[in-house]
Image (cartoon, grey):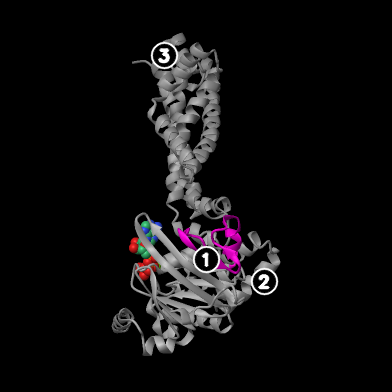
Amino acid sequence: MEFHWEVFDKYWTWIASGLGLTLYISIMSMVVALVVGLIVAILRISKSVPLTLFAHAYIEFFRAIPLLVFIIWLYYGLAMATGINFEPVMAGVICLSMQHGGYLAEIYRSGIQAIPKGQWEAAYSLGYSPARTFVKIIAPQAFKIVIPPTANQGVSMIKDSALVSVIGVNELMRQSMIATSNTFRPFEFYTVAALIYVALALGLSHIAKMVEDRMK
Amino acid sequence: MSDSLVDPSVDRNVVVSLEDVRKSFGSLEVIRGISLSIRNGSVVVICGPSGCGKSTMLRCINGLESIDAGDIVVDGISVKDKRKLRLLRTETGMVFQQFNLFPHKTVLENVSMAPIDIRRMSRIEALQLSRELLDRVGILDKENEMPSSLSGGQQQRVAIARGLAMNPKLMMFDEPTSALDPEMIKEVLDVMRNLAEDGMTMIVVSHEMGFAREVADLIVMMDEGQIIEGQSPEKFFEHPREERTKKFLSQIISH
Ligand SMILES: Nc1ncnc2c1ncn2[C@@H]1O[C@H](COP(=O)(O)OP(=O)(O)OP(=O)(O)O)[C@@H](O)[C@H]1O
Ligand SMILES: [Mg+2]
């Protein structure tokens, strides 16, 4: 077997731009997912029955739908049926953030509910409103609980972002595929792509671990 | 019972009045028609067997539980007036069995945050007030500690200071010493005794009968969601009217 690592002489800029887009999509999707997750989690624990039901349905639906199916449905299916056309990157960010928003909502909900009821009651007894109690008393305590699972979710986000290659987004995976078809060097390109994904995932986990340790 | 009650419409000194209060959880009626009024500066100790509704009654007084019938008025505010519920709560301190301090805040922050956030007191004023209160409960040297590094008795004293920082008209205590090791019970009861001597209106759910005998103006015996007897300490201990009270006292004292 022969390796031809010199193919990267010509293609490393492709890979670099793919990596850039992968990071961009992952970060954008994560930011949106964090907001969506928080909103859905708050609706989920609210006292209003319709809002709770909506949040519950959201969580169940977007966690259940396979991401690949969702991406293809949104980009091709919905566009055909309604004429709403998203840019591929936009479509990818929407799908990733909606699904991960559902996962994060569950993470947040369990984090919030892990805080003893007595904390709410102590704040209420001092005259705090529910919203202020959440912001000042509950959220800071829940925050520490949700950091590790949220970081895991970020790792999944990076990995899942490879799926948007199917709608023609030139992120890391698709750039590797194109480079491969131009050079017929699948082993070299896919090995590098895999190593980059692994490095990103490990790097993020490591950062999360440091943040977690700092807060103890 | 009626001899120990005061009509709130006539007596302006009444801080809390309960009028035929009822409360159910699902089909279980936990508070079954309780009436009681408490005058400014008096200390009421509530006792009764487990599950008779003592905690629920306290929680109804500051609106942590809503009531199904009757009325509760604290310092002129009805718990049924949802718009004024938070105002009512600022006038009503509550001390819990499990302390419920805010674990992410220092001792000083625990005491000072509500005066700053809710009373809109300046930071400097609030810190000064909080230090005075921490000093009063004998724990000023711990002001910068986190609650988790304190003993149970110390935590409960911080919780009392936190309640007092809102300058409430009424302090409620739900079994404040029953989660404490025996050697710490006294330090908490001493703080409560001083508070009573300073004229604070207090409702205390407790089975500390020594404390009740010494500090209470009125001892109320509850059973199955009702007040079955309310007496001065002397009468309560020497001549309890009810068989159930006698039985309860003999169990408490013998254990
Ligand atoms: N949130 C709730 N939902 C359903 N039932 C409840 C709730 N809170 C209390 N109860 C029930 O109401 C009854 C009275 O409870 P409560 O806590 O007021 O009793 P207590 O006199 O304080 O008892 P203890 O001495 O054990 O603290 C009990 O049967 C309890 O199981
Ligand atoms: Mg109780």
| Dot 2 crowding, Cα within 10 Å, few <14, some 14–19, many 20+ | some
Examine the structure image and report whether residue A58 is included in the region drawn in magenta. no
**Which quarter of the figure is the N terminus of chain A placed in?**
top left
Q: Disc 2 or 1, which lies upstream in sequence? A: 1
- Kindly state the secondary structure of the residue where label 3 is placed: loop
In the displayed structure image, the side of residue B75 where residue B218 appears, left or right:
left
Q: Position of residue B90 (x, y in %)?
A: 59, 64
Region of the chain picked out in magenta, as a range: B62-91
**Disc 2 and disc 1 on one polypeptide chain:** yes
Q: Quickly name the residue at label 2.
A: B128
Q: Position of residue B146 (x, y in %)?
A: 52, 65
Visible residue check, residue B109: no
Displayed-image quarter of ligand 1: bottom left
Which one is closest to the eye, mark 2 or mark 1? 1
Please name the amino acid that badge 3 sits on: Arg
Q: Quickly name the residue at label 3.
A: A185
CA gap, disc 1 to disc 3?
A: 80 Å
